[in-house]
Amino acid sequence: MATGNFLRALGVAVALSGPVAAQDLFSPVIVVNDRAVTGYELDQRVRLLDAFGTPGDLPELARTQLVEERLKQQELDRVGIALEEDGLERALEDFASRANLSAEAFVAQLEGEGIAYESLRDYVGINASWRDYIRARYAERIEISDEELEQALAQQSNQTTGIEVLLSEIVIPAPEGQEAQARAVAEEISGLDSAEAFSAAAREVSAVPSRDQGGQLDWVPLSNYPEALRDLLLGLAPGEVTPPLPVTGAVALLQLRAVREGQVPAAAPESVDYALVRIPGGRSPEALAQAAQLDGQVDDCVDLFGKGLPDGNIQRETVAPAAIPQDVALDLAALDAGEATWGRTENGGQVLVFTMLCGRTFGLPEGAPDRDAVRNLLRGEQLQGYADTLIADLRASATIVGE
């Protein structure tokens, strides 16, 4: 016997040298409701897990698996589901293919390590049946939204190091007839060179919700900003402020607080999905209160409809980043999907603009999973969540002795 096989066999023997080995191997060791788990089954499962190279406490894991398989089998019996012989053969072939073997060769290899065919058959069969049952029971409940898919795709593409910027913002209202005054205030603020002074100014004059944080934003990939602004931002030293940036109904300023290399999407967004909600009343207390209320009521762009505003007041666009107007692009840059900002006005200050990011669509880097693969992965994760909950419920209502 090779040294490695000897050590594995020794490990199994030691693991079973406690109460299990002291009993008749075919006597019950654990009883799950009215179904027994024998010492022989525990011995076989430990050997099987060891052959798979499974890490951890194998005797404990074997106990847990066998108890849960008894619970699964009872549930399958209750609903009348059984795996046909041809289905079992396919499941065994699929399982063996993971080791690049035929089912026959895989069984022979395991038998050489003291693992009976029946032990593998039971392990594969119950889990294949359970997988099919979970899919049939919960498939209709699984719905992967576009936002979830895009978020997962973005995470898949977070595989490169890129530039992130830490900024503060001020958006000064400039309604019709007051543009000159707003620009004069912006010119004065653009000469500031300390974060404290800029934050104080933001709390005093900024029109957007970030004013409550002194205008401070979180780290944002530089690529979120319009291309025309990127060189401008990188040309700033920490503490410096951009020149006044004219936007619809306002003047914007950005202060650079820091620059760093961080994990950013390996591919730039292919398109940006956003919504603009136009609220009558400009910056009146009523309109601002309505914007704040709307922000608290919605989690995504679909929720914007049916909140008391005419559908004609809601504009949703999906466009390439280069096609986004600069004022909207500035609103969107620091937002994650489902987040919103407001403060700019249109129509001479008579309409308040509420801007929400619905999502960014990222191109996938070379070698990344395609959209269907990522969607299937998300479906699998949701199905596993339902399966885990069902097992927990079955455990809670079961009588288990000896585990």
Image: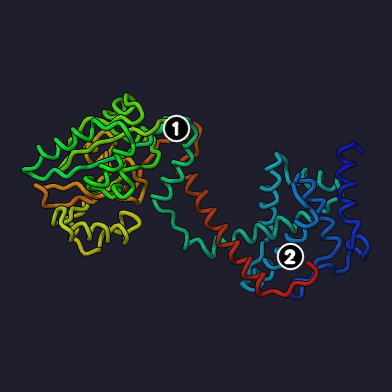
The residue tagged 1 is: 266
Q: How many marks?
A: 2
Residue drawn at 75 percent across, 59 percent down: 122
Quadrant of image for the C terminus:
bottom right
Question: Element under label 1?
Answer: loop
Identify the image quadrant of residue 217.
Answer: top left
* Image quadrant in which the N terminus is located: top right
The amino acid on which the numbered mark 1 sits, given as a three-letter code, is: Ala
Q: Which callout, 1 or 2, points to the residue nearer the camera?
A: 1
Looking at the image, is 257 positioned above or below residue 278? above
Label at residue 67: 2
Q: Position of residue 112 (x, y in %)?
A: 86, 45
Pinpoint residue 383: horizontal percent, then vertical percent.
Answer: 54, 58
Task: Please determine whether, in this image, residue 156 is positioned above or below residue 306.
Answer: above
Q: Up-down: is 41 above or below 92?
A: below
Q: Distance between the Cα atoms at labels 1 and 2?
A: 44 Å
Identify the mark at residue 360; answer none if there is no mark.
none
Q: Amino acid at mark 2?
A: Val
